[in-house]
Every structure is written in C-alpha cells, then in structure tokens.
Amino acid sequence: MNIQSNNNAASGNADNTTSTKPNPFADNMQKVTSIHHWNDHLFSFRLTRPQSMRFRSGEFAMIGLMGDNGKPILRAYSIASPFWDEELEFFSIKVQNGPLTSRLQHIKVGDEVILKPKATGTLVNDALIPGKRLYLLATGTGIAPFASLIRDPETYEKFEEVIVTHTCRHISDLSYGKDVVERTMNDPLIGEEAVQKLKYYPTTTQEPSEHEGRITNLINSGKLFKDLNLPALSPETDRIMICGSMPFNIDVKKICLENGFEEGSNSRPASFVLEKAFVGE
C-alpha cells in the first residue's frame, strides 16, 4: 500500500546564480532490481536493501524520486517483502497526474529511488494479542503489508489459521496478490505451513468472478465464513488487520467494534489494528 505523507516537496524560487548542489539524498539512493507491470494501473518493483536496514514484516518506509525543482517527492509505501528478504519489494498504483506515481511508474532496472531506511507502522504481529485465527483484510494496494506478513514464519507460529481477503474492482487487479500467495505456498521456508494454514479469498466488485462483492457485505451477510467453513468473528479467538482505502478502513473498524473487538497499537496490543494513513499518489 502506498500511503500519503506530509513530506511533500516545498515550493521555492530557483536561484540561477548558484551552482548545482550535490544530492542531499545521495546516501539514501537504492537501485531498482526488477519491475513487473500487472496491468495498466498497478505495478510492483524491487530495490536493493541497505545492509543496516531493519524492519518488522508489515511496516512501511518512505520512498520517492527527485522532482524537477531539485526537491524530493516522498511517500510512505508498505514494504511487501518479509523482514528476511535481501531486497525490498513494493506494490504501487499508477496515477497519471500523481506527483510521485506519474514518475515512479516509468522507472527501469538500474534506476535509483530514494529510500529512507527507517520503517514503522501498526500492521505488525507485535500489535496484536495472541489468538487462534488471523484475518488480513485488504483492498487494492493494501495487500502489500500482508504480502510481507504471509511470508514471515512468525505469522504461522502465532496463528493456527491465516485468512487473506483482497477486494478489487477487476480480476486483473488481483494478480499481484494471487502471485504472492502462490509463491508463498511454494516457498521452501514456509510453504508447508502456508498450505496448511493460509486461506486466500479474493473478491471483485465490478467484474464477475468466483467471489463477488465488497468484503464488508460478505462479512455482514456471513457468506465469507460459509464459503471458508469458518465460524463468525469472535474477539475471543480472532485477530484482524485492516489495510485499504479510508472508507474501507472505517467500515471494517466499525464492524470490529460492533463485534466486541478492541483496537491495538505497538504500545498497547489488542484484537485488531489498521493503517491510519491515507492512500497517496
């Protein structure tokens, strides 16, 4: 998930009398190692990882590019790769007039991207109290932090079942999540546990597919649990992470609170957590 940040480039008047200044982010530049365009508005890419960078699966970091005015255009992006990966993976939308993604969508292997190595976020296992079942509820690029978490062995150590739901408008929008789940099932490190514990439930809202409708409606109607042969949500056994558009986050948070769940944080773990930042461009 790419998340709106307040670190937008400040405006200023160009000084034509000064010489070109060195890039203040030179020490934060990482090289693009691979890119995959999933359709005309979604792509993923991988960057080199600084040796000193540490993060927990599910966290996000600031990345960006230099603008024409010499100022950085930075946004917070969920890290889609797990903590143990030697590279950093990100999943992004393409917005043709977006300050960052209008540029980022054109990167090529070998190009450099700004990466500020400090990671943070609430979508981490540490922010949840122990439970039996983990629900990872996502829309759009909100699948990114869950792509990290389902490839972390700790997730399967803490939970008996892990349910990933991913709601998008069209089937092609689900391609990245489907690919990550398939790779996880075949991973030599965690594949065996993933096959036993991981359930993947993709839904579409604007194109016919195996599962159709908003996940909020499928939860409220009970269809999600019927399809997966699972009991209804219970704060006694279930833990929930939420990542998507702000309206989606608000709607699912309401469902959680109405069912007796309590919102958690890094400093006070509880039964559900959500990413509070806005989706950015």
Image (cartoon, grey):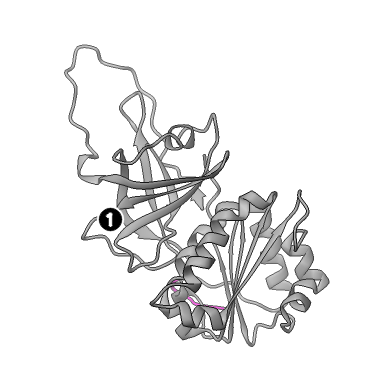
Vertical comparison of 174 with 82: above or below:
above
Instruction: For residue 168, say whether it is visible.
Output: yes
Query: In this figure, what is the number of numbered marks?
Result: 1
* Residue depicted at x 38% and y 68%: 56
Q: Residues within 10 Å of mark 1 (few under 14, many from 20)?
A: some
Find residue 16 and report its horizontal and vertical position in percent. 24, 12
Residue 269 in the magenta stretch? The answer is yes
Find residue 117 and report its horizontal and vertical position in percent. 29, 54
Residue in front for this viewpoint, 172 or 256: 172
Residue in front for this viewpoint, 61 or 161: 161
Name the residue type under label 1: Arg
Q: Residue furthest right?
A: 221
* Residue depicted at x 52% and y 53%: 277
* Residue depicted at x 77% and y 59%: 212
Vertical comparison of 28 with 17: above or below:
below
Instruction: For residue 245, say whether it is visible.
Output: no
Horizontally, is 243 left or right of 10 in the view?
Answer: right
Main SS category, magenta section = loop
Horizontally, is 260 left or right of 143 in the view?
Answer: right
Find residue 10 and report its horizontal and vertical position in percent. 38, 30
Q: Quadrant of residue 196?
A: bottom right
Residue hosting label 1:
49
Q: Residue furthest top?
A: 17
Vertical comparison of 215 with 173: above or below:
below
* Residue depicted at x 50% and y 77%: 269
Find residue 125 and report its horizontal and vertical position in percent. 46, 75
What is the span of residues highlighted in magenta in the rendered image? 266-270
